[in-house]
Amino acid sequence: IDKYTAGAEQWAEETQLSRRVGQWQDRIRPALEAENARPEYNIKTYQNRVLDSVSAAPQAAATADKDKEKRKLAPFEQVAGGCEHWEVCRLFLASLMLANEGNVEVHYNRETGAFNLELLASSLRTDIDHYT
């Protein structure tokens, strides 16, 4: 009887675990299906979109910290305007990679929480293929 009771308890625990795993799978499945339906993430494509958007931005007024030269600044909100939330994340990562490569500089406004991208070089400086 003790063996039967121990086996029944183990089966009940496994059944409960299986049920919880099944519930988790049911919750995560729609998110995974939505992700699979999206276009593949090609960082080069998104980097070029960011560069094109910042390049098309009007020149900002001259500032003292840049020796009175005009510079191209684009609010990230403008770069990502009209995009789905998942695509904003992709553009943000591409912007960070561009900053790392020296194509853009990120200017953060602590008061508003917004940031601008300043164009430093309009063509990709490093072939991203070496990261794969």
Image: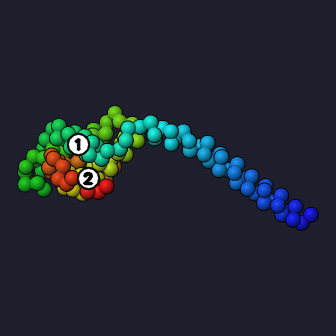
Q: What is the distance, in whole Å, between disc 2 and disc 1 at their CAs?
A: 14 Å
Residue at the spot of label 2: 129
Instruction: Identify the residue at image location x=89%, y=66%.
Output: 2
Provide residue 91's location: percent of width, then percent of height. Answer: 31, 44
Return the residue nearer the eye: 60 or 45. Answer: 45
Residue type at the position of mark 2? Asp
Q: Mark yes or no: residue 114 visible.
A: no
Q: How crowded is mark 1: few (under 14 residues within 10 Å), some or many (20 or more)?
A: some
Return the residue nearer the eye: 83 or 65. Answer: 83
- The reply to whether dot 2 and dot 1 touch (C-beta < 8 Å) is no
Quadrant containing the N terminus in the rendered view? bottom right
Instruction: Identify the residue at image location x=44%, y=36%.
Output: 37
Q: Which of marks 2 and 1 is in front?
A: 2
Q: Which mark is residue 69?
A: none
Quick one: which residue is furthest to the left in this view? 68
Residue at the spot of label 1: 48
Provide residue 3's location: percent of width, then percent of height. Answer: 87, 65
Q: Mark yes or no: residue 98 visible.
A: yes
